[in-house]
Image (spheres, rainbow, N blue to C red):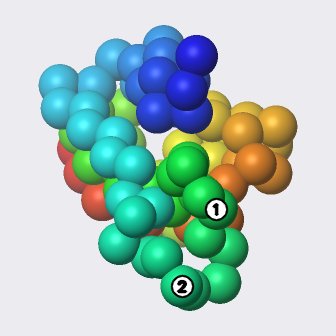
Amino acid sequence: MGIVSEIEQKLAAAFRPSVLEVVDDSESHRGHAGFQEGGESHFNVKIVSDKFGGMSRIARHRAVHAAIGSEIIGRIHALALDISD
């Protein structure tokens, strides 16, 4: 299973989002720090869930990072997040 699928599964289980988009954006970072041949180094995530209501921006980011888990976070270079409730 690829990292996109792993991230999708973990976020879907944790937040039951109404919108969830996970995009491997690695190719657009070719030549930059952290780029890995074959991709799976840079990701963009858009997630919308009622579970983020009342949370600060930092709390939302921490919750997403916790849901994804340190094992996946440790395998990627960059994670851009667009989070809303």
Callout 1: 10 Å neighbours few (<14), some, many (20+)?
some
Callout 2: 10 Å neighbours few (<14), some, many (20+)?
few
Question: Which residue is tagged 1?
Answer: 36
Up the image or down, 48 lies above or below 79; here it is above
Name the residue located 40 percent from the left edge and 64 percent from the top edge.
27
Q: Name the kind of residue labelled 2 in the image.
A: Gly
Name the residue located 47 percent from the left edge and 23 percent from the top edge.
5
Farthest front residue in view: 37
Of residues 28 and 51, the one drawn nearer to the viewer in this rendering? 28
Q: Which mark is residue 64?
A: none
Q: Name the kind of residue labelled 1 in the image.
A: Gln
Badge 1 vs badge 2, beta-carbon distance below 8 Å:
no
Name the residue located 45 percent from the left edge and 76 percent from the top edge.
29
Up the image or down, 54 lies above or below 7; here it is below
Labels 1 and 2: the sequence-earlier one: 2
Location of residue 82 in the rendering, given as x and y in whole percent from the top left corner: 30, 59
Image quadrant for the N terminus?
top right
Badge count: 2
From where the camera sits, is residue 30 visible? yes
Of residues 46 and 39, the one drawn nearer to the viewer in this rendering? 39
Up the image or down, 3 lies above or below 1; here it is below
| Element type where label 2 sits in the image | loop
From where the camera sits, is residue 62 visible? no
Location of residue 72 in the rendering, given as x and y in whole percent from the top left corner: 72, 39
Question: Which residue is tagged 2?
Answer: 31
